Image: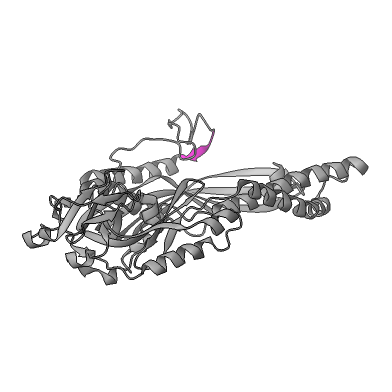
Amino acid sequence: MADTSVSYTCPNCGAPLSYLPGKDHVTCEYCGTEFATETIEKLFAKAQERAAAAEQEQEEKWETAAAGKDWSEEELAGLQVFHCSSCGAELVTDGNTMATECCYCGNPTMLPARFDGALKPDEIIPFQKTKKDAVAALKQFYEGKTLLPAAFKTGNRVEAVQPMYVPYWLFDAKVKAEATFRAEETTTYENGDTTVEETEVYECYRAGKMAFERIPVDGSVKMDDTFMESIEPFDYSQLEPFTPAYLTGALADRYDVDAEAAVPRADERIAGSAAALLKDTVEGYDTVEIQGEPTVHKKKGDIIYAMAPVWILTTRYEDTPYMFLMNGQTGKLAGSLPYDNTKSYIYMAVSSIVSLPIWYYVIYFISVMEDLISGHGFSMLVFFIALLCAIFSGYLVRSYLIDQMSNVHPAEDATEYLKEGSFKLTAEDDTYLYTHKKNRPKGKRKSDD
């Protein structure tokens, strides 16, 4: 939603601002920052203009009812739907299948019912990777995982490998976006016996337009969205008009998240992309941080109901099931492996011990405290600091090794689906706010403040 009102708040701390009689500047009563009157008037005049424009701008919505097609009687005759009697998952197979295995829990299931009551997909991406490819990708995923339990690799076997077509809603959108950023530029110089750190603070406004093509949102409740986003992207150049013939030999999950329910996730990814694209245009500063959320105005675009190929691999270790997904088109695999916790602490300890002498000598030679503390006391202090640094280094090594055991991560934005050449910056404005200074004795390090 666009902001249609303007609050006079401090750009530094967000507290309410007020003019003080008899002053030629505005002072925040909470943080004490002073602003030139002209700066505040200019800043909020721009904000009022944007609020007025936002009030006139009406966001368009996707016509979600237009996605998908109706099934013909002939196509319905060739499909069947069933509910797993064990976990309740709803799956689809071709009409020739009399019995199968649930890809979620492995339960053998009979298929008595007919497929009906759902939209027909517009398009489908056929499988390009085989079962053999999926098993090989899983074994390759094991390689190089230092913390993988030895028993998992030697005694583990893949219990089930299922090909499945997963429902997706693919969203197109033309977008106008705007955002405000806080930018800082820091200069350090010497003034006599003092080191001065001078930081200029700016408010940077950016607006732009962009277009996205086929942002995917998983249409199945049962398929974990984070897993599904981890195996993106799909190559849309291989989309084919849908025909039930592609379902032969594979399961198909019928959507239970309709297009309207999928819209918020598409909007989240668009907002994330808009913020990142606009931030990249704020150049020439040392630090840049977005203020609040970007304002996004979306023009409705097409929605496609599509089916995408996924291999589901299930394995088990110490009575705990582990599921892995592989993109059936590109071969990209996502999953989380178990790790040996004892082994992780061993690596942490070894890393700490190895790095301890390194930290000791580094801290010893760069320390400025030797003149203040001499002899045994100085050495003990250096050793204590080095020990803390070494333990922290070991902790970082352990965290890194644990992170390698999983590659399941949600998508932060939809930049991969940005139409080439569509991003255009339409407005930019950098407003100087104020300067703050820090003084410290020459030779004193910034970290000592």
In percent of width and height, residue 205 lies at 39, 51
In percent of width and height, residue 18 lies at 43, 30
In percent of width and height, residue 175 lies at 28, 56
Asked whether 35 falls inside the magenta stretch, the response is: yes
Q: How many marks?
A: 0
User: Which residue is nearer to you in this view: 345 or 43?
Assistant: 345
In the image: residue 250, left or right of residue 11:
left
The answer to whether residue 296 is visible is: no
Residue pushed farthest right?
A: 375
In the image: residue 179, left or right of residue 307:
right
* Residue at point 80%, 42% (across, down): 384
Q: Quadrant of the N terminus?
A: top left
In percent of width and height, residue 243 lies at 17, 66
* Above or below, 442 relative to 325: above
User: Which residue is nearer to you in this view: 147 or 66?
Assistant: 147
* Above or below, 249 relative to 362: below
* Residue at point 30%, 68% (across, down): 127
* Residue at point 71%, 46% (across, down): 391
Residue 145 position by quadrant: bottom right
Q: Which residues are magenta?
A: 32-36
User: Which residue is nearer to you in this view: 326 or 152?
Assistant: 152
Residue 447 position by quadrant: top right
In the image: residue 28, left or right of residue 151:
left
Asked whether 418 falls inside the magenta stretch, the response is: no
User: Which residue is nearer to you in this view: 183 or 166?
Assistant: 166
The answer to whether residue 192 is visible is: yes
Q: Which secondary structure type mostly characterizes the magenta part of the structure?
A: strand
In the image: residue 418, left or right of residue 386:
left
* Colouring of the image: one colour
Q: Quadrant of the C terminus?
A: top right
